[in-house]
Amino acid sequence: MEELDHDRLSSLPKEILHCILSRLPEKDVARTSVLSKTWLDTWYTFPILSFSTGRFMQMSPLQPMKDGERMRKILGLEFCDYVKRSILRFWDQNLTIKEFKLWVYVDCFGLDHILKDVDILIKLACECGVE
């Protein structure tokens, strides 16, 4: 029996790979990026963007509620920068965002620090043609 040395799934058109990703939980979608260069590129161009301050906080070693006002502001800026870079990746490649989800738990970062940035992020996503 001849051994398969070619990943046939990765050779499918990107639109089909995106369709496959759209049926997976968000965590699993991100996990596919380590499978191969093809899957990393597919993940980078996956047109469903979903961001949550809660998930972002789980990844952070810092605890803004314990570390004070200054730390909340820093983390809020880092979160907004992460979302902005993700949106701009689509802008740079002239890709359309099919779905944009943004969950912001304002107590994490403080309302004053993040409200203006959230408005900017939503406008930027709209400029990238969210369907």
Image: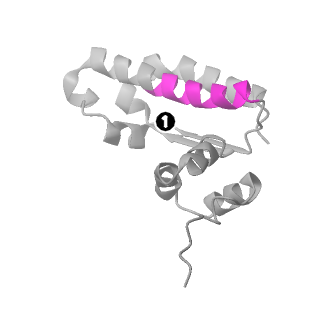
On screen, residue 39 above or below 73? below
- Is 89 rendered above or below residue 54? above
Indicate whether 33 appears above or below 10.
above
The residue identified by callout 1 is 104
Task: Please name the residue shown 46% across and 53% down the image.
Answer: 31
The percent position of residue 102, horizontal first and vertical second, equals 57, 38
| Residue 41: quarter of image | top right
Q: Say what secondary structure mark 1 lies in.
A: loop
Task: Choose between 93 and 110: the one closer to the eye.
Answer: 93
Q: Image point 49% across, 54% down: which residue? A: 35
Answer whether residue 43 is visible to the viewer in this image: yes
Magenta segment boundaries in residue numbering: 79-93
Residue at left offset 56%, top offset 17%: 116
Instruction: Classify the position of the N terminus by image quarter.
Output: bottom right
Residue 106, horizontal then vertical, whole percent:
43, 31
Q: Residue furthest top?
A: 70
Return the residue found at the far front: 2
Quarter assignment of residue 40: top right
Q: Residue furthest left?
A: 66
- Reply yes or no: does residue 96 show up in magenta: no
x and y, in percent, of residue 85 in the image: 57, 25
Number of numbered tags placed on the structure image: 1
Task: Judge whether residue 110 can be spotted in this image.
Answer: no
> What amino acid is at disc 1?
Val
In this image, 26 relative to 56: left or right? right
